Amino acid sequence: MNADRTVRPVTSYHYRSIGREERKRERERETLTLLSRFRLTLATLFTFFFSYSSPSLFLCVIDLMALPDSSRRNSLIPTFLYSSSPKTLPLHHMLSSGASSAAEAAPSPPSSESRGSGIMIRSPSESRKIEMYSPAFYAACTAGGILSCGLTHMAVTPLDLVKCNMQIDPAKYKSISSGFGILLKEQGFRGFFRGWVPTLLGYSAQGACKFGFYEFFKKYYSDIAGPEYASKYKTLIYLAGSASAEVIADVALCPFEAVKVRVQTQPGFARGLADGLPKFVRSEGTLGLYKGLVPLWGRQIPYTMMKFASFETIVEMIYKHAIPTPKNECSKGLQLGVSFAGGYVAGVFCAIVSHPADNLVSFLNNAKGATVGDAVKKLGLWGLFTRGLPLRIVMIGTLTGAQWGIYDAFKVFVGLPTTGGPAPAAAPAPTSELAKA
């Protein structure tokens, strides 16, 4: 049978076919090489850009990159930005691969000599964890503050609207129930949410500064005091840290608060922030937006000092006396429940302490050219302390409890511990030091 086979001569057609296949393979090799270089270049630019322009965003993106293999297909991050090594891969190791393929770019774990240098990119196998008091920690606290303050204040806009009108026009808005009835009759259901945009934006900016800078100043003042005095005078550190943070936060809040009060208490002035802000500036100038800054400090600084110091103290007492289990052994749900309860009780104290200044802020932002003396003369000293107080206790208690619940829930979501609780026990001295003593 083999002898019967006809051996066909090799023709020019076969040579041309072989040549096309070789050229096709060569083009594929060139394409792979270019792709490899492009991947390395893009990964390098991506890493340097985020690490230098926004370190916190860089860490967040790296956290997104550190997804399990099953989730990579659903990720918007290109897969070539992942490290294929089971351990962290330094960036300079990627850069040294040159024009080699992507598989050669991440073959082996870094040596002990290279671990201390270069920017590190975490592989998917590494756990996502934010280091305490790192830039990513403060960024997470800032984001949690935005969510906790912006969303909660926007949600209670109807209560805030009735409260402001009771403070400005007590003859018309005599009680909470009549206030809601008058607003519903005159402005309809949509009137209950008038001014929600400046409320959302203003208190989001305030929350970002309040929680972010509180964590910063608390650590800063603790480091100045030292471990012994920081533990002994921790309440003073809570008070100083919260007051410092609120001074900055109110500068961000004040323009939005001025427009919000004018929109809520003067029907027809404006529909919201977009038309209310330019109209306010034309009427009273840019500095008029900060006319209520000093009374705002008078309202918010005592409020925030009470909010943070009482919360930290109440939560510590709950874990020490009401819950037999140590905090680190409690479930996350129980810890968040403690945060809400501690925040609600702290909110009641906050409302009482800051209410006179709240009446002043509402009066000054509503009346053009009004002074503190005018407010005291019209409202009276007793009215300054009590007008609208029951509604504000309900509103601020619920608000503060929800704020601490959302803030700590966000911290748990990103892998951080909840706020407050017993201070960790001091580490025992080493045996050698005890022997010397």
Image (cartoon, rainbow, N blue to C red):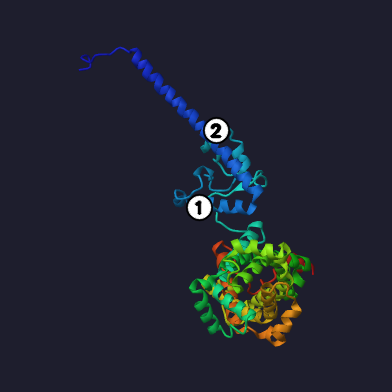
- The quadrant the C terminus occupies is bottom right
The answer to which of marks 1 and 2 sits earlier in the sequence is 1
Look at the numbered disc 1 and give the secondary structure of its residue: loop
In this rendered view, identify the residue nearer to me: 122 or 155.
155
Say which residue label 1 marks: 67
Residue 260: percent from left, percent from top: 62, 69
In this rendered view, identify the residue nearer to me: 434 or 286.
286
Residue in the picture at 23% in, 17% down: 2
Look at the numbered disc 2 and give the secondary structure of its residue: loop
Picture layout, residue 388 above or below residue 55: below
Say which residue label 2 marks: 100
- The quadrant the N terminus occupies is top left
Q: Is residue 196 visible?
A: yes
Residue 432: percent from left, percent from top: 75, 65
Give the amino acid at mark 1: Leu
Q: Is residue 215 visible?
A: no
Q: Quadrant of residue 4?
A: top left
Residue 414: percent from left, percent from top: 56, 61
Residue 145: percent from left, percent from top: 61, 65
Residue at the farthest right position: 437
Give the amino acid at mark 2: Ser
Label 1 packing within 10 angstroms: few (<14), some (14-19), many (20+): some
Looking at the rendered image, the disc whose residue lies closer to the viewer, 1 or 2, is 1
Residue in the picture at 75% in, 77% down: 372
Residue at the farthest bottom position: 382
Label 2 packing within 10 angstroms: few (<14), some (14-19), many (20+): some
Picture layout, residue 277 above or below residue 372: above
Residue in the picture at 52% in, 76% down: 186
Q: Quadrant of residue 398?
A: bottom right
- Using the numbered discs, state the Cα–Cα distance from disc 1 to disc 2 in whole angstroms: 26 Å
